[in-house]
Amino acid sequence: MKPGVGEFRSRQQPITHIAPTRPGMSWLAWLFLMVLRRISKLKMARGLEFIHFAQWQRVRTKKLPRLSPDQPAENFSHDFFMFTTNYNGDWDQYIDTFARVAHIRRGMWWLWRFSQGFPGPIPLRNFKQFIHYQTYSEALYYSAYPAATVRNIAAALEVKRELEAFSAVRPGEETPAAFKKRYLGMVTAIAPNLGSAPGPAPYVIATSQPGGLPAMVTYTRNGKRKRKLALGPLLGRLATGGGGEQTLIAAMSPIEVKPAHAVTKEIASRIAAVNASTSPSPFAMCPMLHMARLLIIDDLRPKLGSRPSASLRTNYLLFVAAIDGRLEDFLDCLYTADPDFAQGVWGRCLGYPEGRDGPVYLRRYIARSLLPVQLPFVGFPGHSALDIRRALRVHSNMLDWMGDVHRTDMSDAELMAAWQGQLAVLLAGDEATR
Amino acid sequence: MSDSAERHDDIQGLLRGFGMRWPYALFVYSAFGDDPEQNQEFLRTLPDALGCVGGPTSVAEVDARRADPGFDSPFNVAFTFRGLSKLGIAPDVLSSFPPEFIQGMRRRAAANRDNGRSAPECWEPPWRDGTVDIWLGVYADTEAVRERQRQRLSEHLAKYGMQVDGFDLPGQLTAGDTPVWLDDPACQPEASQAVEHFGFGDGISDPPVKGLARPGSGVTDVGGKLDEKGRWQPLAAGEFLHGYLDEIGEVPAGPTPTDIGRNGTYLVLRKLSQDVDAFRSYLSERAQRNGMTADELAAKLVGRTRNGVPLVASATADRNDFRYAGDEHGVQCPLGSHLRRTNPRDSLGFQTILVDRHRLLRRGMPYGRLVPRDRKMSDINPLAAGATADESYPGQGLMFLALNVDIRRQFEFVQSQWINFGNDLRQGSDRDPIAGLHNPAHPKNNRIVILTEPAESVVVCSEIPSFVETRGGDYFFLPALHAYAAIAGGHQYQ
């Protein structure tokens, strides 16, 4: 069950929604998503200002990763349509908005029209029931900036940009009067963005790239070093001018063939231990990670009210993440941060090379587990997780300035001196400085 | 099925409001005994005991007898879930009520941000202990009539082994000749204007409900929802009453069988204390620091001047006929002001679509006497000054009453997302400067950013104390008259 109003643990909440596709509609769904990816920048999702990331993908049941000869093929008569997102705010408000704003309603209708049981955005009660029923619970959800909403981040990035532009004029290049005039212009410009936002999570993350790791090697699906595997088409990778690129992934790793359940329970316990721990999670040690979630999928639900055409023969671990740059670098970092976690979760899955330590095997294994992402959405393209965390820190510094120092009755010279005295602190976005 | 309210003779009069015709109120909170049949009999005989006929006063009766001098005291009744469960209603019917109503306001404290000094353990006894079963709202045209009704009600309760577990004596306040401005006498509300204790005109912007307006009353659709052409329209009756279509054209989920809910609604009752001294002192200190008058600053925090004029210009003479388009950055009316938070109108885009499902019909009344500008609360409150409890009861505040058909989607949403959180209006975690329940442990976040007009500077009002605190309250079911009669008649609704 989703947290209710005022009960959310962080300001972000994940939705993982997997619905069966209508008979014969699987390829149409795929085509639709691919066309949409080409022609749409998903402005509607951006305009809502409460979605951080989203991805839509068609999941082919016949192509679910089979990574061990012991693993049977799945025999569903249909494919699935998966929608994963994270948003901030109230669940009902989120769904209400989908249904009530005309062009978003049309968009939703198109996106889910290939799914069985989709009743349309209205009646809202049926739509909510559809969403609820096909939503799967996350075993773990991580965000690099859990307290920040989309609007917090937009405000922080804007304040940081204005502050950096304002600070480009060197001390001594202008008179106190000119400074104050510019200053008032700047604070007036950023005033609508000065709502207080809690900073990023209070732990320090590693900020250097991991070194000394094996070079990137890519593998084919059977694990042979045949040729470099182009992961691009598999990933929700977005080229974003100037700011690097962000990658959305979904990897579904087989855990064990049913009815066995012991390994699944062990993995669930390992994940639960991370959730329960007060120490930073292994994900927090990866500076390029925006968000991640892990789900244990022991079956896929049919349309509400109908009998399943088949059941999953294998339990799966679904891993969804949004990262900066290359997946391989992230996996190296994750493994290095906590090898026991990587080995205890993916290392226990079917097809993971037994007794093999090292990030290269995790990379290889995840690469074989990937599900193609047809339609990715990123709320802040071009801004890395570190950029966002720094901006939130600078924003917080500026709020302190506005609350503690800024006064309308300060003289020009007083104001200029105070500003110059605090400038280094104001622009300090590195967590090590706190 | 219609989205327009019908059967005014079946809807309790609180939906209309008792206004200045019956400006004195007596709210009595009591607990039923253990015998459902005796409790039903109490309800059957209650109207007679209060000098009324049939049942609780309906909207139709309020309208029809408004000019009747003999009709001096209407009354309405509502039940907590605990109360309903003592009236012999079948268990499966009881369990069909929504979870937040079943849990009650005390258990929903986290959702409503009732913490610190507003936490349930600090509430007044009947609310703190969760012992209230029934709300009896008796309205009167004079204080003497109210006193008479209070006596009658006490006797009637005693006759059935019940007692007054708590009471309040709210009433409509008008500014009259009591000065409530701080440093600008021009801000003084008109003498006949209904005001609240911080000295602002009140009751100006309740939403119009389709089919509920009294014919010939002059009530317009202004302040409702905006249609695609930008015209005001009334809100669908289903947002405020069970049994009607709501804003998305559906009949909201309600208790089953539907007959028990039809023409009924939920009443959110909260006793909110107002610290008038702290409010004035904060205004004076911050205004001086920022080169404003205290009344200017007060208007920025509230979103209207004391005499009710909105900071965003009205399109017509109607003080409720305004929208925020053109003031996206809050230069005229701060984005974090009380008015803009509690009803953002078109601030969230898409006309008012993102707001329409979170509206409340407010029927609150202040309690306590107005504090003139040059006096302190202790000068006005005899009990606080050491007088006996019989003379009066202490403090200034508001008996906040809100009617809505979905407590979670409407009242709790406004409380948690708009008043005690600011994301939708780009205010981050900042809270409503007036009604927000501020956290004294994080005073820097208890703030509002104000752009001064013309846009020359920015004023940050930080370390805002909680001017308003919760003293108690609960969620009630306000049944239609037919449901009241059925419950009182022992109908189990199976």
Image (tube, coloured by chain):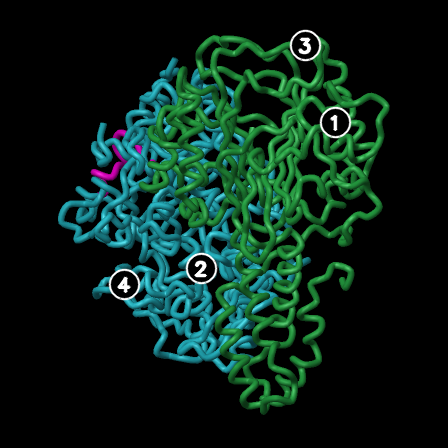
Numbered label attached to residue A346: 1
Earlier sequence position, callout 4 versus callout 2: 4
Q: What's the residue type where badge 3 is placed?
A: Lys
Q: Which residue is mark 2?
A: B338
Mark 4 or 1, which is nearer the eye? 1
Which chain can be seen in green?
A
Q: At which x and y percent is residue A401? A: 64, 72
Q: What's the residue type where badge 2 is placed?
A: His
Same chain check for tags 3 and 1: yes
Does any portion of residue A252 appear in the rendered image? yes
Q: At which x and y percent is residue B133? A: 49, 32
Numbered label attached to residue B396: none
Q: Which residue is mark 4?
A: B319
Q: What's the residue type where badge 1 is placed?
A: Trp
Does any portion of residue B126 appear in the rendered image? no
* Measured Cα–Cα span from mark 4 to mark 2: 16 Å
Q: Are marks 4 and 1 in contact (CB under 8 Å)?
A: no
